[in-house]
Image (cartoon, rainbow, N blue to C red):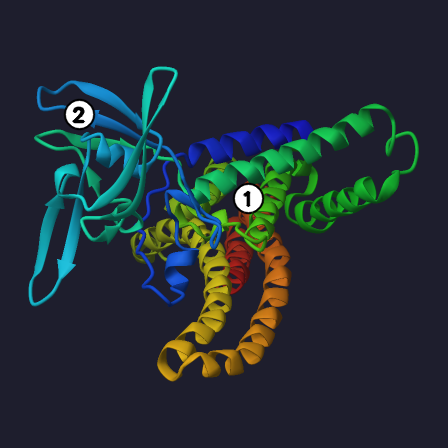
Amino acid sequence: MIQRASTFLLLAVLTAVVLPANVQAAEDGELDALHHSANAYYLDFEPFGKVQLPRIFVIQHEDGSYGLELFGSTASAILNGHFVAEIEEHGDETDSETHDAEGAVLEATEEHAEGDEHVQAAGKYGGISLEQLEGHLVPPGGAHVVIDMSISRHLFFAWIGMLVVFVIMTRLAGMYKRGVGRDTAPKGLFQNLFETLIMFVRDDIARPNLGDKTDKYLPYLLTAFFFILTCNLLGLVPFGATATSNLMVTVVLASFTFILTQMGGTKDYWMHIFWPPGIPMFVKPILMPVEVLGILTKPIALAIRLFANMTAGHLVILSLIGLIFSFANIFGPGAGYGVAPVSIAFALFIYMLELLVSFIQAYVFTMLSALFIGMAIEEHHHDHDEAHGDHAADTNAASVLVS
């Protein structure tokens, strides 16, 4: 079971391979909460520096042919002349200005190793930080980007989350294969902790909603729970990033719930959507689009709920820390030092709250997924009027949980 859950995890993460984002640079001396919590094409280890991530593009050339462009960083893509940066300048009018490598105000050094030329860039590009250009790269001439498969910060930490869960589950599976926890009692804090969480998902989330079909859907539910929990916790680690605060990641996870729900839907489930029983004939055409809309709103609510909760907490923490820089800039360094204890105390409180929210959001997503799937696979053995009443009650209950 644990190995099957790991397989689902690999598929879920690899599906979210393209995570585009617009990244804005912070002003000197200020802490930009949106910038630090947003997606980007570099890893931020300030004050030690930044590590740029590879940029990968599928390009369609002027002659209609396709090609793959691979660069070690955003700076490399610009300096090699293969891409230019479109910068929107906001003034009295909004213009789009294109800068290429010739117009760059850039300090560069060239290193030669084993016959290859490597360019390392530092400083400003056309007076604009390279971080501001990320997500705005376009090929020169008539070529255009078909797919941007660049490795972003959130994708990188999603891979780390995948790897962490895979290692944990593989180790647990090996222990159970040896009979530890199966023929004998679980051994050690590691196995007891994760067995408790696994049993919680099975007995308190899956079985009450899925009944005798629990074993069929439990691998997915375990995968969703542990992957979301791991990504949430990675966002609380210094220099980390929260993959679940990216809408693309949460949409992929919610899409899996949506697909499993529709694939498992019974005949009675589809009848209540396209031909609701027990109601006047002239009302049926009105209810059908409402029911179809209800199918789509459930995964949308799942995706937005997880994304919004994980984003909001980090923005609050960073905004509280940012008060120190704001007060220092406005009233001087003394005011910054004065407000620092209060800001840090409140930020620490929100941080502890975020730790709790990380577990709650993993639970809520898994529980709602089990509920939606359970509503679709439920077999009705009574007349349609009663079935429609029960279905409406279940839908109302789910709507309350979603809202």
**Residue at the (8%, 31%) spot, across then down:** 141
- Say what amino acid the circle numbered 1 marks: Ile
Q: Residue furthest right?
A: 184
| Whole-percent x, y for residue 353 in the image | 61, 67
Of residues 257 and 33, the one nearer the viewer is 33
- 130 over 140 or under it: above or below: below
Please state the horizontal and vertical placement of residue 47, each as a whole percent of the image.
47, 55
Residue 174 seen in the current view: yes
Image quadrant of residue 121?
top left
The answer to whether residue 268 is visible is no
Instruction: Please name the residue that numbered disc 1 is placed on.
Output: 373
Q: Residue at x 19, y 34 (%)?
A: 83
- Please report whichever mark, 1 or 2, sits nearer to the chain's N-terminal start: 2
Query: Front-most of 276 and 223?
Result: 223
Q: Which residue is mark 2?
A: 60
Say which quadrant the N terminus sits in.
Answer: top right
Across and down, in percent, residue 113 comes to: 38, 20
**Could you tell me which secondary element the residue under label 2 belongs to?**
strand
Q: Position of residue 327 (x, y in %)?
A: 42, 80
Give the residue type that dot 2 points to: Gln
Q: Tell whether 52 sits left or right of 170.
A: left
**Mark 2 crowd level (few <14, some 14–19, many ≥20, 10 Å Cα):** some
Mark 1 crowd level (few <14, some 14–19, many ≥20, 10 Å Cα):
many
| Residue at x-position 26% and y-position 27% | 58
Residue at position x 40%, y 45% from top?
Answer: 248
Helix, strand or loop at label 1? It is helix
How many numbered markers are drawn? 2
